[in-house]
Amino acid sequence: MMQARGNSSGLLSTDGDSWRAPRQRIRPLHVTAVVLAVLMLAAGAWAIIWIANDSKTPPPPPPVATGPKSLTTLETAGITALLNSQRSGPHALNGTVAANGRSFGIQLAYMADGSTGSGTLTAGGLRGDILVDQGVIYLRGDQPFWAALGVSGPPPAPPGWTVLPPDFLGGKVFVTPGTWLAALAPTNTARLDGATYFSGRADASARVTDAGITYIHVFGINADIRAITPAEVTGPAALVGAEHGPGVPLGRTPSGEWTLAPAVPPVLPPAPTTAAAPPAPPTS
């Protein structure tokens, strides 16, 4: 039995100063309920904020179409205008031409009407000169250059120009713009794939930019193309083609191979002879 007694401080004490009143414990169930309530309130507030912000966010833009697409009427008119700009004036072409299963390097500065032009043709790492004068195409080079082109015979005497026939290298030493522009004219199946335009005729295509037509792929010609000044055409052509003369025609051997020697005329069979008519009988 505990006894209360006084001490020197005048306060009452009980047996065992370590005694404490029993603490009231919060049951775990009550703690869990409080935590859940707080979490639910936080989740509700977050949901309200998310819904409010989401309603203000604009919908994402529709996906951009990729790959080839048909031309609109406006695009057709624009490409036609760019193609027509190649029909006149001075231009430069730099690329390759494919003929007879081979590829040849070509560089030309020319007037679109074919009146003037000059440049180079490269075969097997060897280079020859090209001259365009009033629609006639001339080519000049040494014997190894001609041999690289598959042409036999010695080159002509100075100034050394040879006149090319229309079918030499498929006529691709100089193709008039009017010819390849016809292949690039838009058709009903013309399409655009980025900056590349396909006319719908075989694999004819061109690169279209703000600067105009900058690249063509047509008739085995793959070349960059750009507009230049008239002086950039006439100046070099005058230097290369000074006193070019009539040029030597390129011929063929009896077996049909190209040769620098004059073409051998075909041997014609002798004309059949007719038997002499018998003399007329004497008249009485």
Image: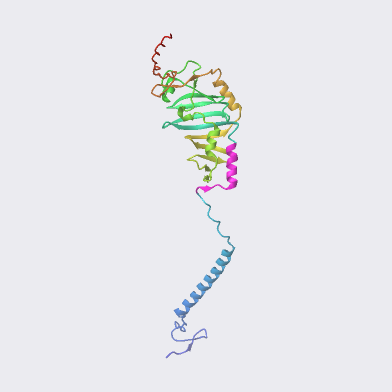
Tell me, yes or no, whether the highlighted magenta stretch contains residue 243: no
Which residue is painted at 48% across and 77% down in the image?
Answer: 33
Question: In this figure, what is the number of numbered marks?
Answer: 0
- Location of residue 152 with respect to 185 vertically, above or below: above
Foreground of the two, 229 or 139: 139
236 to the left or right of 155: right
Point out residue 221 in the picture as x, y percentages from the top left corner.
48, 34
- The quadrant of the picture occupied by the C terminus is top left
The answer to whether residue 69 is visible is yes
- Location of residue 252 with respect to 89 vertically, above or below: above
Judged by its main secondary structure, the magenta piece is helix
Which residue is painted at 58% across and 44% down in the image?
Answer: 76
- The quadrant of the picture occupied by the N terminus is bottom left
Point out residue 143 in the picture as x, y percentages from the top left corner.
43, 20
Point out residue 233 in the picture as x, y percentages from the top left corner.
58, 27
Q: How is the image coloured?
A: rainbow
The span picked out in magenta is: 67-84
Give the farthest residue toward the bottom.
Answer: 1
Foreground of the two, 259 or 14: 259
Tell me, yes or no, whether the highlighted magenta stretch contains residue 78: yes
Foreground of the two, 280 or 263: 280
